Image (cartoon, rainbow, N blue to C red):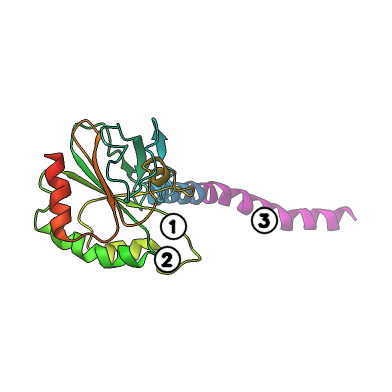
């Protein structure tokens, strides 16, 4: 019995030693895999590379009613917004001492889809002048047409900043959106000078910009 045990022991000892010798190699491979995953997952905005829920501060604007001649929001400070674009990169369009044109677009809205090429041509021709242009992608719904919105916006050649609204469309609600496309123009102090909704011709877009000058 002792002879058999000795032989068995002699056969198994090298295997245990070989197995132990592989542990440093396996540990090094595992560490390298972690480093690669971290490196690939890093973006300029957040680790996921996905849009983040926007933070909205301040008092909300009253709901926009295009049938009312005197908009009660005129002169009001727009809510501050801190959000992200499609890639999760931070977008902070407010409180920067610039006049602005906010354009709210919904992927399923046929009027938005008709307005987008008009807006892009107008913007590329310098129609917005010195205004900061912020496109707000809002009211996103995976059950409605033209989802997801990103390919549509990018294929349309949108030249300005994009801010992705949250799951509750909190930016749209805070800015008083009642219909899309929706436009909010502010002065350099972020106070509303004009609001409008629906498909707008370039002449009306020019008029809105004039009000912010």
Q: Quadrant of the N terminus?
A: bottom right
Q: In this view, does 88 lie to the left or right of 212?
A: right
Instruction: Report if residue 117 is visible in the image.
Output: yes
Is the C-beta separation of discs 3 and 1 under 8 Å? no
Q: Name the residue under label 3.
A: 15
| Residue 36 picture location, percent across and down | 42, 51
Quick one: SS at disc 1? loop
Magenta stretch: give its range: 1-28
Mark positioned earlier in the residue sequence (3 or 2): 3
Is the C-beta separation of discs 1 and 2 under 8 Å? yes
Between 4 and 84, which is closer to the camera in this rendering?
84
Task: Examine the structure image and report whether residue 21 is included in the region drawn in magenta.
Answer: yes
Quick one: SS at disc 2? loop
Mark 3, other Cα within 10 Å: few <14 / some 14–19 / many ≥20: few
Q: Is residue 210 left or right of residue 178?
A: left
Task: Please give the label number shown on residue 124.
Answer: none
Q: Mark 2 points at which residue?
A: 147
Q: In which quarter of the image is the C terminus?
A: top left
Viewer-nearest of discs 3 and 1: 1
Instruction: Report if residue 156 is visible in the image.
Output: no
The secondary structure that dominates the magenta segment is helix
| Residue 76 picture location, percent across and down | 30, 32
Task: Examine the structure image and report whether residue 13 is included in the region drawn in magenta.
Answer: yes
Q: With respect to residue 212, does 189 lie above or below? A: above
| Residue 46 picture location, percent across and down | 40, 43
Mark positioned earlier in the residue sequence (1 or 2): 1
Q: With respect to residue 140, does 165 lie above or below? A: above
Task: Please give the label number shown on residue 140.
Answer: 1
């Amino acid at each position: 019995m002792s002879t058999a045990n000795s032989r068995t022991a002699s056969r198994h000892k090298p295997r245990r030693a070989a197995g132990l010798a592989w542990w440093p190699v396996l540990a090094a491979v595992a560490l390298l895999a972690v480093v690669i995953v971290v490196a690939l997952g890093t973006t300029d905005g957040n680790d996921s590379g996905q849009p983040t829920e926007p933070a909205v501060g301040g008092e909300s604007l009253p709901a926009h009613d295009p049938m009312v001649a005197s908009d009660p929001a005129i002169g009001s400070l727009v809510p501050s917004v801190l959000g992200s674009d499609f890639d999760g990169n931070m977008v902070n369009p407010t409180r920067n001492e610039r006049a602005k044109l906010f354009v709210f677009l919904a992927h399923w809205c046929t009027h938005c889809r008709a307005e987008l090429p008009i807006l892009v041509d107008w913007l590329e021709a310098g129609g917005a002048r010195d205004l900061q242009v912020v496109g707000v992608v809002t009211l996103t719904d995976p059950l409605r047409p033209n989802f997801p919105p990103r390919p549509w916006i990018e294929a349309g050649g949108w030249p300005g900043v994009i801010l992705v609204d949250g799951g509750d469309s909190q930016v749209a609600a805070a800015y008083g959106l009642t219909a899309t496309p929706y436009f909010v123009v502010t002065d350099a102090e972020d106070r509303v000078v004009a609001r409008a909704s629906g498909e707008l011709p370039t002449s009306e877009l020019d008029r809105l910009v004039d009000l912010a000058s």
